[in-house]
Structures are given as C-alpha cells and as structure tokens.
Image (cartoon, helix red, strand yellow):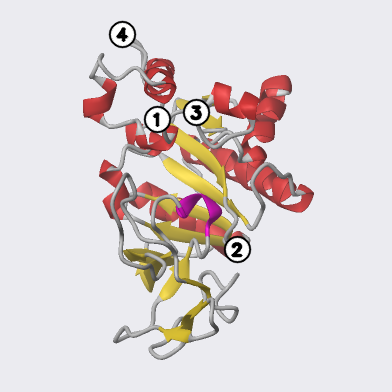
Amino acid sequence: MSQIERVAIVGGNHGNELTGVHLVKKFQQYPNLIHRASFETLALLGNLKAIEEGKRYIDKDLNRCFTNQGLQNPQLSSYEDTRAKAIQQILQPQNQPSVDVIVDLHSTTANMGLSLIFCDMHPFLLRLGAYLSSTNPMVKVFVNQQSREGGFLRSLCELGFVIEVGAVAQNILNAELFQQTEQLIYGILDYFEAYNQGNIPQKSSTLTFYQYIRTIDYPRSDAYGGLRQRGEIKAMIHPHLQFRDYEPLNPGDPMFITFEGKEIFYEGEFTVYPIFINEAAYYEKGIAMHLSQKQQKIV
C-alpha cells in the first residue's frame, strides 16, 4: 500500500454526540495537536445544523446519506442529503487527491469502551487494530462487513473507520472518555506517521475481534395501521445484560424482561457477544443490540 497523505477526522456526524464534536473543535483551534510531518490532517464537523440544535439529525440520519446513488441524485434535497454532498466534495475534491483515511468519531449510550468499527477485513486496518488493542485493553475491534453498503461516511474511503466511545449519554460530555478518545486519536496518527516512515509499530501479531452476525429487535406487539412500521415495545433489556457489551451471551441466558417481569431468554445455538446493547438512537431503527462472534486472526 502507498503512503498515507491525507487524513480526515470527522466529528458530529450525529449532532448530539458531543465527544467527537468538541474534539474536532479542539483540533481546529489547536491544529498542531494533530499535525504530523508526513501527511496532512483535516478536522471536520459533520452535521452542522444538528450540532447547533443539539439533535442527532434534522431531517434524516446523515450517516446513512453517503451511498453512491444518493450522492449522485440531485433530487435529494433534505438538509442531510445536501450536507453529505458538501462533505464528499471536501473529502473527495474534483481534480485533487481524496483523503486516504477517514476517522469518524461517534459516541454511544452502550458500554462499548473504545471501539474501532471496520467495514471490511483490510489488512492495514486489522494491523492497526491489533496494535491499538494490544497497547490499550479498552480498545475493541468490531468488523461489520454488511455496513459497507449502508451509506456510512466511512464508506467514502478504503481506509475509513469509526471510533465508537461509550457509555455516554446523548448531549453529554464525559471527561474521562473524552481524554481517552483524544489519546487514542494521537496513537492512530502516530501509527500512520510510523507507517509512512517504514517503521510500523507492532506489539502483537494476533488480533481479537468481534464479527457482526445480525441485529436483534426488542420484543414487540403486532404492528397496526397508519404510519407505524413496528409494534410497541413489550420488553426491556434484561438487567443481567445491560452494560455487558462484548461479554458472552450463552444459550439460555436472560436477554429481555417484559413490563410484567417475565424473562425472555436467548435461544441461539451458540455463544454470542452482544454490542450496542440498548443504544438510545437505535430505538427508532428497531435495534436492541448487535450480535457478534468473537474471533482471532494472525495479522
């Protein structure tokens, strides 16, 4: 792979995820913090109007607006569709080099620590993940190959990936997680600098990662007419599962509990590792959690 020449750090793709918003504002104010000699680093705010209003989005989720079809469709004129096109022009300017890496900063109400989310098994990203997780036990790697076609910002770039930090409430700053995310970003930039200089740091050649299997919705009543596409939620995340992201969920373990107190158990045939458990922003998407499989790979 050729050298890394341009890196974009994007925060506020969702306007109420303040860790990324304020890190990018800090980097814009103090660009020396993200300056490295061998490549250019751009700090960019995503959904400007949603950031101003303290909302996840204005009309639609910006982080689903980066499909090729949507970006090329002039008829799509919502605020987020328009902003997605503007961001693409910044990151992929005509007749100029595109960014080589996109680091998309997000926070979650789920207890996911410092998670790196990759949309494929690119060898460079896997080696980066192995290095970062070997130097910091809070770092976990989640690979969701189905997300390549989901219109995510990171899909604009071969080496695009997400840093997902939690648990932190929406529209809230958590100083400890803010500082840990900041240090993780500096570690990533230092890794890129070392790579460009032909001196790739590597503490471990084995990567432990979590491979996406599927999503699980909350138990719901039957949907009824009108605009509602899903029925009402009938159960909550079980207290034994809440905040246990990346921990094993075995067949027969409690998964949900109804409002009447009835337990609902995991009926799968093998152990899985849930993540994004009870993410607040996913209620509207019909997602209670993602299920993943824990794997190891020599990188």
Q: Which residue is mark 3?
A: 58
- Which of the two labelled residues, at mark 4 and mark 3, occupies the earlier sequence position? 3
Identity, as a three-letter code, of the amino acid under mark 3:
Ile
Q: Is residue 149 left or right of residue 153?
A: left
Q: Is residue 35 visible?
A: no
Residue range (magenta) = 279-283
CA distance for labels 4 and 2: 42 Å
In front of the other: 16 or 97 = 16
Secondary structure mostly taken by the magenta-highlighted segment of the chain:
helix
Crowding at mark 4 (Cα within 10 Å: few <14, some 14-19, many 20+): few
Query: Compared with residue 291, is residue 189 higher up or lower down, i.e. above or below?
Result: above
Q: Which residue is mark 2?
A: 111
Q: Which residue is mark 1?
A: 100
**Which mark, residue 262?**
none
Residue 231 in the image: x percent, y percent?
36, 60
In front of the other: 130 or 14 = 14
Quarter of the image where the N terminus is located: top left
Residue at 32%, 44% in the rendered image: 227
CA distance for labels 4 and 3: 31 Å
Crowding at mark 1 (Cα within 10 Å: few <14, some 14-19, many 20+): many
Identity, as a three-letter code, of the amino acid under mark 2:
Asn
- Residue, far top: 95
In front of the other: 25 or 59 = 59
- Which of the two labelled residues, at mark 2 and mark 1, occupies the earlier sequence position? 1
Q: Which label lies toward us, 2 or 1? A: 2
